Structure formats: C-alpha cells, structure tokens
C-alpha cells in the first residue's frame, strides 16, 4: 500500500488532460488482496479505481479513489490452450507478454493491438474495450473475451460469460446476490431491447457507453462482454479468459498514395474487398510533423500522394501473401484517380512503414513552432463506407472553429485519431472547445457513428468536468465520471 505524497503524485495522471491525486494506491499480489482492499474501501464508503497501464487518453486512470495497480505482481499468463484457442491472464498482463507466449510457439495471437502494445495491460484493454491496428482481422477486445472473473463493490466474486436460458434459470434458482444481479440485467435488457437494437450504431468501432447490446438474447446474454468497456465503474476484473486467433506468419504491406486523405478514405470499401488484416490511413500533415520533429521515421518510403492507406495482407505462405499484395496493387490502377502503390515485402521496410503509423501520437504532440495540441476529440468512428464524406465535413468543422489537426487512424474500421490545437488555458478557449465538442458530437451521430471508437469515454467523452469529481466520493467505483452517467449500480 502506498499512501505517501510521492506515490499519489505519480498516480495522479495518465496520458490525458486530467490530473487528480488518488486517495492512495494498493498493489495487490493475489486475488485475495484485491478482495480485502475492496472490503476496506466498502467499509469506509471510499471509491475504487482499477488502473491498467496508465496510457489512457480520456482520463480513465486518474480519480479521487483508491487505485488498484495490478501491473507489478498480478501480470501472469496463467494458461494457453492452443486447441481451444483461448488464454487465461491476470489483469496486469502486458499485451506483448501474452503475444510472445502465443504467437511464437502456436501461431496464435490476441487480435486487438493498440499502439501501446508494449505497455498496455489486458485489464486496461478490458476497461477501455481497446482495438488497435489488427482489429480489422479479429475485432475489438469485447469480441475476444470468453469469460471474466470479477469482483463487485459489495464483495460478490463470480465468473461471467455467455449465459444460456438454462444457465440463467440455474443462477436465479440458487438465489442470493448473484441471482439478484442477473435478474436486474435481464430486466434492463428486456425493458430497452427494442431501443438498443434500433439505436446502437452497427459499426466496427462503437465503444461509447455500456455494451448493453451484448445482453440481448441473440448475443447470448454475454455478461462478460457487456462489462468490457465499463472502465472499472461496475466491477474489478480478477482474471480474464480471452480468445486467440490465427496469426498469419507471412505478411506483406501495400501503401497506396492518393491526392488527399479524403480520397484515401473514399477507397476504404474497395480495399476491404481484398480482406486485409490491417488497414490504416495517414495524411500529409502527420508526415510533415514527423519531418519537423526530425523523427527519422523514413517518410520518404511513401509513394506519391497527400494521403495514404497502409494495407497489410497475410497468409500462410510467402507466395500467397505476395499474390494478395499484387492483386491489390493491380486493382489500385483501376480505382478513380489511379493511386500510386508500393509493395513492401522486406521485414525491415515493413517495420519502418508501421513505425510511421504508430508514431502518430508522438508526431502530433509538441510540434516545433506550432500551437500545442491536446486530446479532447480523439477517436470518433463512423461506418467505413461513409468515412470520406465524414472527414470532409469534419475538416470543415475544424476550419469553422479555427482549429488544425492531422488526420490518421484505423480507416478500415472508420476510426479517426487526431490531436487538436485547443486552447484549454483561458475561459474563451474553453468555451470554444465546448462549442466544438457539441458540434463534433452532432456531426458524428448524423453519420451513424460513435463518439468513442477506441480509447473509451473516460472523463472526456462522458462530459464530466473536474469540478464534479468530489461527488465520486459517494460512488462505489470511480473511473470516468462522477456525474452519474458512468457509475456503478
């Protein structure tokens, strides 16, 4: 337990705009430690926050709460079952540690892979419903969760997952607090099922709010997947069983250059027909920032253009992967505008190309001679087929409010990243930011999209301000909001 001022200062911030010193920090060695810590917090009515790798951009990892940090001790891969294609992990397990135990010996992988794959923990990914470059291949974190062992604030410890009608009846028949929770979830589902079906965006990247759609009968009343993305507001995750997918051993990267980033986005549906395992987009502004910062990331590798699609195809043999890449490059010749194309089948060059994309956040922060940029409208997502038109309207909205930003992200899933030069220092700048956020939210919903497409809601997209954080003292779990929009029941 660390309640000294230095430790509280270290845990007061994540990668977002927020800084809130916690009450203290608990670093558990075992599940029993977690149960005991939550019991003490419950006794005194103190909120609890389960923290992942601290890389969140929306303020999920900081709050006036007792922080649980699993990364020091509870970080193990407990089991890998290659036959069933599943793995059991502790919440502090770093993604790359899991992948090293599955990819190399079994040619399996955990598909969601954020750019922070060397630091992010599985618990944090579960909290945010993380995605990453290869979610085109395997979906979001929620799509890759089989079962969770969880702890509620009132001390109930249980395993949750898909729930058949028979299993539901057995749980209710047993009675107790678990039965009460399941009855409540079923009642919530039944009350709002029609509205959930009608109004939840049917897009690859919706991580806004709670996954109430995973409670629907046609989604197997999957309580574990419904809890993914709740950002520690409902439960603490003690252990996760996750799905593994085949990892194509042979990969080739094709980069397509277009007249601008909007044209690149227009062609996403055509590229998706070639079944890529990754499909990313970057614009000229991002490349210029890299050059301005002397990042030495080889932007000269890119073909001619002002906007680019980075496409990765995979197969079990080099010949098959190269054939897929060649078919895509040939198809590009018949696309409107005849985009330029380069094929990279050299491992070193492929890594250099991916470094261009993964360095997007670093390249757009603190650019010399440019106003400072911030998170704040970080990862909205729309249907991939409408991405080009959305980006044109979004660029017009930036111009209207006098903002500038590089546009890049997971184009294959319709998810856009951008750091924007907000003025968050004086009242006039904050008022302008609020007006922009309202207009941007209206725009993305008009396109049938989601305010959060990857990085979670946190304190940013939940519409919560630091002034209301004090009310989190009355909440059982504190993470992204103290206003009641994302708190535990």
Image: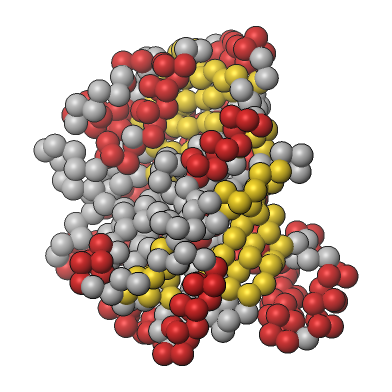
Q: Is residue 241 left or right of residue 183?
A: left
Answer with left or right where residue 397 lies relative to residue 257. left
Answer with the quarter of the image where residue 80 lies. top right
| Furthest-right residue in this view | 166
- Rendering quarter of residue 235: bottom right
Residue appearing at x 60%, y 65% in the figure: 227
Kindly give the residue lying farthest to the left in the view shown.
Answer: 369
Nearest to the observer: residue 205 or residue 2: 2
Q: Nearer the viewer, residue 251 or 214?
A: 251
Is residue 429 visible in the rendered structure shown here? yes
Instruction: Say left or right for 60 vs 272.
Output: left
Q: Residue at x 19, y 31 (%)?
A: 293
Image coordinates of residue 379 in percent, x first then y, are 43, 49
Q: Which image quarter holds the N terminus?
A: bottom left
Q: Position of residue 349 (x, y in %)?
A: 41, 16
Q: Residue at x 33, y 34 (%)?
A: 359
Q: How far from the left and from the top, in percent, is residue 369?
A: 11, 38
Residues 137 and 401: in front is 137
């Amino acid at each position: 337990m660390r309640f000294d001022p230095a430790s509280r200062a270290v845990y007061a911030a994540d990668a977002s705009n927020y800084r809130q010193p916690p009450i203290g920090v608990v670093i558990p060695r075992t599940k029993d430690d977690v149960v005991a810590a939550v019991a003490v917090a419950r006794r005194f009515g103190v909120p609890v926050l389960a923290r992942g790798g601290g890389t969140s951009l929306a303020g999920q990892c900081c709050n006036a709460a007792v922080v649980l940090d699993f990364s020091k001790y509870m970080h193990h891969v407990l089991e890998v079952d290659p036959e069933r294609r599943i793995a059991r992990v502790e919440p502090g397990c770093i993604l790359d540690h899991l992948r090293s135990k599955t990819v190399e010996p079994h040619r399996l992988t955990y598909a969601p892979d954020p750019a922070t794959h060397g630091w992010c923990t599985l618990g944090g990914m579960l909290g945010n419903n993380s995605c990453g470059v290869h979610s085109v291949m395997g979906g979001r974190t929620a799509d890759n969760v089989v079962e969770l062992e969880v702890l509620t604030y009132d001390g109930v410890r249980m395993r949750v997952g898909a729930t058949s009608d028979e299993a539901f009846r057995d749980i209710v028949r047993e009675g107790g607090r678990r039965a009460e929770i399941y009855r409540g979830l079923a009642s919530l589902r039944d009350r709002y099922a029609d509205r959930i079906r009608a109004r939840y965006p049917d897009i690859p990247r919706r991580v806004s709010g709670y996954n109430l759609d995973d409670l629907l009968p046609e989604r197997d009343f999957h309580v574990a997947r419904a809890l993914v993305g709740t950002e520690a507001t409902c439960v603490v995750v003690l252990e996760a069983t996750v799905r593994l997918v085949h990892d194509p051993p042979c990969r080739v990267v094709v980069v397509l250059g277009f007249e601008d980033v909007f044209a690149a986005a227009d062609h996403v549906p055509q590229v998706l027909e070639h079944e890529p395992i990754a499909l990313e987009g970057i614009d000229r502004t991002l490349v210029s920032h890299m050059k301005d910062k002397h990042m030495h990331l080889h932007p000269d590798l890119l073909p001619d253009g002002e906007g680019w699609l980075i496409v990765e195809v995979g197969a079990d043999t080099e010949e098959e992967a190269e054939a897929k890449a060649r078919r895509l490059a040939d198809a590009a010749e018949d696309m409107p505008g005849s985009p330029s194309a380069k094929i990279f089948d050299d491992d070193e060059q492929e890594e250099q190309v991916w470094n261009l994309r993964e360095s997007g956040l670093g390249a757009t922060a603190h650019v010399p001679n440019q106003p400072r940029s911030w998170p704040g409208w970080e990862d909205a997502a729309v249907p991939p087929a409408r991405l080009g038109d959305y980006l044109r309207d979004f660029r017009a909205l930036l111009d209207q409010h006098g903002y500038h930003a590089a546009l890049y992200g997971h184009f294959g899933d319709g998810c856009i990243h951008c750091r924007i030069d907000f003025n968050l220092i004086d009242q006039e700048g904050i008022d302008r930011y609020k007006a922009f956020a309202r207009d941007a939210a209206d725009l993305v919903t008009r396109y049938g999209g989601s305010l959060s497409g990857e990085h979670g809601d946190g304190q940013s997209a939940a519409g919560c301000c630091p002034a209301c954080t004090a009310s989190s003292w009355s909440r059982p779990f504190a993470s992204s909001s103290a206003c009641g929009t994302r708190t535990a029941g």
